[in-house]
Amino acid sequence: MSDTKREFSKTMLGQHTDSLARLTPNRTYRVGFVLLDHFSLMSYASAVDTLVTANLVTGKRLFSHSNYAIHQPRVASDLSIDLATDGTAHQITTDAEGRRLDAIIVVGGYRSSLRYDPVLIDKLKQADHHQLVLGGLWNGSLALAQAGTMNQTACALHPDNHAYLREKYPTVRLADTSKHCTDTRLTAAGPSSTLELMLEWVGNLSDKSIAGAVREILAPDSLASGTTNASSMLQNDPSLPETLRSLIQLMRANIEEPLSSEELASCVDLSRRQVERLFQAHLGTSPSRYYFELRLTQAQRLLVQTSDSITRISLACGFVSSSHFSTCFKDFFGESPSVARKRQREAG
């Protein structure tokens, strides 16, 4: 964020910046993230970015965060990007400087195992006993359920794990929204809902104006978004085979660097031909065409909701060049990206 924007945010929030300090006098609110193997990097980034940006807009160190793995000093994300941690499961209840945490958030992911290390479960029970705030992102909240810390509490969870929760933890109530925030429990189903969850939490801890300023920086497009993501609805459509929903989710999670047909098939243990038959039978199209249209639809949404350049949008949606993107966009929507953006702005 530029110095000008930072100073503007400080000025705008001047009358509110002491509110969190009054709730937690003379110290920083310490948050620990437990990163499971193959954790969702986007969910983690959404959570941390919210805390860091809250510090920036107020000019105070309202939050600190530490990362923990179960055993190893580094842990692999779902994007095969390793992240260094500040400790392992044995140190989960304290930060890198040995000070007790205020909140522990377990970050899961699409390929994260649902079999949790006993040390993690024990630490979560201890944290609950000491009345720490506990959270779970994606399917990380299932670790909280296994530790017995979610009984009779609503839990937001990734749709792929809803049936598992109902079968294994019948005393845990499945939330009817993609995020759920209380004074002591924080759960979210995916990256977008994680951002909304953290914004709500920051607002509850401090002041709604601080959360609003963070939103203006991190999610300005959400303020004007009134569209429904069709692929998101299909991903959660229980009438579709689970494998097909998983493939749609993989596509949505890999827009910038599209997976090949072989990679998609490998992720769900099917052949390329089996995947093609699955899409044709249920959606009436090929996987490559569906993926292509999904990327174009995402590009159209970015054109309307953001001020990013057309070149940047084309790269963010997996096109090798802006000229190729413009040609594909015009063939599909009947107008060039620049014309589409101008028309939408004039209509708005």
Image: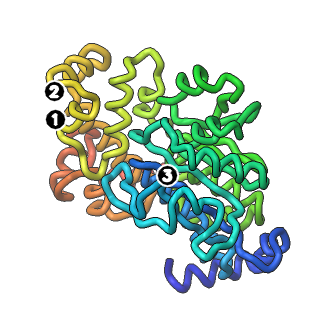
Question: x%, y% of residue 243?
Answer: 34, 24
Mark before the other along the chain sequence, 2 or 3: 3
Contact, CB < 8 Å: mark 2 with mark 1?
A: yes
Q: How many C-alpha atoms fall within 10 Å of the one at disc 1: few (<14), some, or many (≥20)?
A: few
Question: Would you say 138 lies left or right of 174 here?
Answer: left
Display colour scheme: rainbow
* Residue position for label 2: 272
**Element carrying mark 1:** helix
Contact, CB < 8 Å: mark 3 with mark 1?
A: no
Q: Where 335 sits versus 214, above or below? A: above
Q: Which mark is residue 150?
A: none
Q: CA distance from mark 2 to mark 3?
A: 29 Å
Q: Which mark is residue 43?
A: 3
**Element carrying mark 3:** helix
Q: CA distance from mark 2 to mark 1?
A: 6 Å
- Amino acid type at mark 3: Ser
Question: Would you say 246 lies left or right of 106 here?
Answer: left
- Amino acid type at mark 2: Arg
* Residue position for label 1: 262
Q: Residue at x 40, y 18 (%)?
A: 240
Q: Residue at x 45, y 44 (%)?
A: 109
